[in-house]
Each structure stands twice: as C-alpha cells, then as structure tokens.
Amino acid sequence: MALVELSLALGFLRQDAGVEDDVVQALLDGATQSAIDYLNRQVFETQADLDAAVADGAAGDNPMVVNAAIKAAILKTTAELYANREDTAIGTVRRATVQRADAAAAASNRAGAVMRAGTLNRRVRIDQRSGSGTLNDPTGWAPLATVWANVKMLTGKETLLADSDVGEATASIRIRFRTDLDNSMRVVLLKFVGGLPVDEAIFNIQKSLPDYAGREYTDLACTEGSNDG
C-alpha cells in the first residue's frame, strides 16, 4: 500500500480528481521514494505490515512505520514537483526537502506567474445552459464542473490580462488552465453547510482568459449576477 494515498495528495494540491491523476501519482511516487532513500530504511504503512515483514525477514535494518512528519514531507515534496513540473525532474529533487518539510514547500513562483495550489481556496461550480426552450424542455442551468478557484472582487475596471478588454468586470475568478469556457456560462460560488454545498453567489462570465503561454491557469472576467446568471 502507498504511504500517502493519491486522494490525499490531490486534496493537498487542491487538484480535482480525474484531471491529472497520472501526473500527480508519478510525482507522488517520486517524492515517496526520495523520502525512503533519505531515511535509508524501509517504511511501512502500518505496524502490522512492519511486523509481517520482520517475520518474513524482509524488513531490513531499522524499519519504521510512516508517521505524520514523513507524510507531510512527501506531500510538500510532491507539491514542489507539481508546481515546477515542466522544468524539474524527480531525480533532481533535493533530499534536504524531505528532511525539512517547510523547505519543501518553498517552490519557485516563476517570477510570480505560477499559480500555487494554496491560492485556490474556494470551491466553485461552473454551469452551462441547458434545455431547448420548449414547453417540455425549458431552459435552465446544468453543472459542467466543480473546481477549486480564487475569487477576487475588483474595484472599478481592472485589467486581468495585458491587452485584453474585459468590459465592466467586477470579479476575477482564477481556476486551473482550461479552454472550454465561454460567456454563455456562469460560475457559482459555493459554501458548505453541514458538509453540503450551497450556492452563495452567482457570477456571469464576461470573458475567459486562458494562460496559453504557461498553461497554468484561466482567469474568468465576471460580473456578479443580479439574477440567476
């Protein structure tokens, strides 16, 4: 079994399941191996696993059970690899990042252009129009995706991207890079009550501004909806 499950790593990265699972799993495997190499001993998921390996004579010298510090180091190393996945090889990760989990979190921000997972701190639902408008099939909204986002309320007309006319946008919503959104859609800011998502605010998408150069994020220039979007 894995020392850190993929679902936990995805949650730590605030990445949605099914988007880049293979990439995250590869980086997670590399970070795990780096931790084991640095510790220079076998690390087991549970005490039962360790005991079984000892009984079989396969535990090696000084085996141990994974603890919270090791898991944190693996997660932070995975986050560093993920933030720099286009220019950092797993094999070049400094083993010192395993020794000090706080150092592992300090990834380069590419002169401010890299979108860190920690900045995506709100869940939003992206809706698209549905229905043909007939009596038996009235128009409405259907969910397209629920993703992590950063919501910034703008004061006046602010430019979100150089040379981009965003009209009278009142909010900038940043999500991970995607190119399938347009101004026929809306974004619904979610809050959680009793663990269940509840609509908190509705934003009309005025323009989708994908970061084609870095392929890190997409900014959505929005106006806060006065109706249902």
Image (tube, helix red, strand yellow):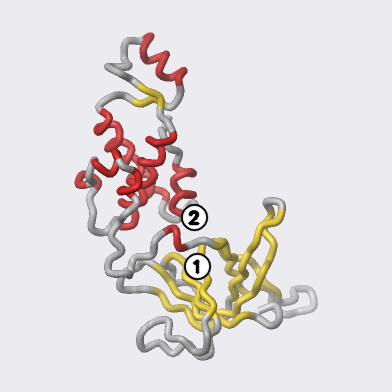
Residue 159 point in image, percent of width and height: 42, 86
Q: Is residue 66 above or below residue 206?
A: above
In the image, taking residue 56 as reference, residue 174 lies left or right, namely: right
Indicate the quadrant containing the C terminus: top left, top right, bottom left or bottom right: bottom right
Q: Name the residue under label 2.
A: 16
Disc 2 and disc 1 in contact, CB within 8 angstroms: no
Q: Is residue 136 above or below residue 157?
A: above
In the image, taking residue 176 as reference, residue 93 lies left or right, namely: left
Toward which corner of the image does residue 136 lie, by quadrant?
A: bottom right
Q: Nearer the viewer, residue 138 or 127?
A: 127
Neighbour tally class for label 2: few under 14, some 14-19, many 20 plus, Cα within 10 Å: some
Indicate the quadrant containing the N terminus: top left, top right, bottom left or bottom right: top left
Which disc number belongs to residue 137?
none
Q: How many labels does the image show?
A: 2
Name the residue: 26% across, 59% down.
86
Q: Label 2's element? A: loop
Q: Which residue lies furthest to the left in this view?
A: 92
In the image, taking residue 88 as reference, residue 112 lies left or right, namely: right
Q: Name the residue under label 1.
A: 150
Amino acid at pointer 2: Asp
